[in-house]
Amino acid sequence: MRKQFFITSIISIGLSIVLGKFVSSSYYYLLFFILPFVVLGCYDVIQTKRSILRNFPVLGHLRYIFESISPEIQQYFIERRTDGTPLSRNQRSLIYQRAKGVKDTHPFGTEHNLMEPGYEFLAHSIFPKEHVEAPRIKIGGPHCTKPYEAALLNISAMSFGALSNRAIEALNIGAREGGFYHNTGEGSISSYHLQGGDLVWQIGTGYFGCRTPDGKFDPEKFRDCAAKPEVKMIEIKLSQGAKPGHGGILPADKNTPEIAGIRGLKPYTTVFSPPGHSAFSNVNGLLKFVEQLRALSNGKPIGFKLCVGRRDEFEELCDEMVKTGITPDFISVDGAEGGTGAAPPEFADHMGIPLERGLVFVVDTLFARGLREHIKIICSGKIISGSSMVRFLALGADLCNSARAMMLAIGCIQAQRCNTNNCPTGVATQDPELIKGLDVKDKSVRVTNFQKNTVKAAMEIVGAIGLEHPDDLRRHHVIKNINATESRLFSEIYPYQDMVVKPL
């Protein structure tokens, strides 16, 4: 194609000159159109980074243009309603409808193959209950002096920096109006978090908001921040489902002076949160850190978040809890399907255990050691509907967190540009021009609506199963297709084994 490019260029330029000289001088204006493409093509030929452009000058750019808009083409013109990942069109539509408070019913029956292996459904009762009320979940073990009563569905961890200031503000106002909590993410507490909503302050390996100049944990800064009345609980982030064991990354273009000031960093530098904590290096150290944070916060609930990986380490941690008598007030179990953090494909695709199996393992391990009674379990990982809530409550969780669904509630369109600073909806960017598109007043109402309508749907399912309280959900209420001819109860797939106190 290079030879054809040069021949075409010479002919086009020559023809424009000839026509301009012998027919009309207006033809000279064609050169203003032709010459930029000639210059571009010549550059394509001599550059060395892209083979396609060297072999196909000018035309090769179409390949990169189509590649850049491939997600949009796929989403708008190709995918069916049940297609699309991480969330299908049906799932996204449900979130939008519930956030807007409009009709969320679906006509003409399900579009799913109910016999497909892996498909799950719930066992309804011939004696359903009506008007099941969503409870508040008390979080606080025997060593906690300031327990907190949480909603069944809350906002999972997303930092200011990863999300825009208006996105954080909309989420917090939505949490305030709806009476549920907002997890700050590991990026510390900004003024946008302080709009009256309850906060769970997450502390990651970077100790943002409570760090020394060299990045270590600072007890005094922690004490000051934990004393804020909006902070109801503190969560130590051990790992997250999107990138377990990898740490965090804040791109330089997102690290604005404002964010750097909040976190105690140098502006416009790429910030890496290390994979592990410097405040502890073993299970005993982790529990002592939990005890230290509880004392520094004057008795507020302290817990930790993890995506289950090495089971022997969690078992060792639980054994240490029994030995020392030090227990967290809650454990947040994140599934490997979690997705609000950008990560290398190797970590996103192949590290960590999915929420279903990780949650069961944590619940059963705590029960087996007599620890479950005082430790609440929070689950997160692609929770976007009432049925997904009920599914995990039946597996043993006490309450749920959601991140991506809350992002969609404030306008996210799953463009998957969160790590580029070019989010088109102003949700996951620090570009002031893009952020202007997000209206805080409108989106905060949608956050409240989504949480309220999703919890309402979950309670309707609980009633349809014949139960009066979500605490009565058990594994035998969920059924899973094993293959085209066999289905099993979750209680058969994940039997209750070696329990000190056996669930009903």
Image: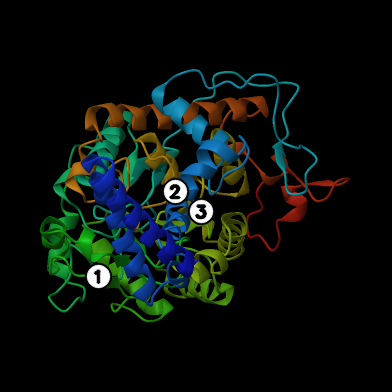
Residue 150, percent from left and from top: 38, 41
The spot of residue 25 in percent (x, y) is 21, 42
Establish if 360 lies above or below 467. Answer: below
- Which element type, helix, strand or loop, lies under badge 2? loop
Residue under numbered circle 1: 271
Q: In this view, does 411 lie above or below 19?
A: above
Which residue is at a point 41% across and 38% down the rendered structure image?
Answer: 408
Q: Is mark 3 on a helix, strand or loop?
A: helix
Q: In this figure, which residue is indicated by the disc labeled 3? A: 373
Q: Earlier in the sequence, mark 3 or mark 1?
A: 1
Distance of label 3 from label 2 (alpha carbons): 51 Å
Q: Report the front residue among 482 and 79.
A: 79
Report which quarter residue 425 is drawn in.
top left
Numbered disc in front, either 3 or 1:
1
Kindly report the distance in space between the C-alpha atoms of the residues bearing marks 2 and 1.
29 Å
Check disc 2 and give the amino acid type: Ile
Mark yes or no: residue 30 visible: yes
- Image marks 2 and 1: residues in contact by CB distance under 8 Å: no
Extreme-bottom residue of the structure: 281
Q: Circle 2 sits on which residue?
A: 69
Report the amino acid beneath label 3. Glu
Residue drawn where x is 80% and y is 51% of the image: 482
Pick whichever of labels 3 and 2 is earlier in the sequence. Answer: 2
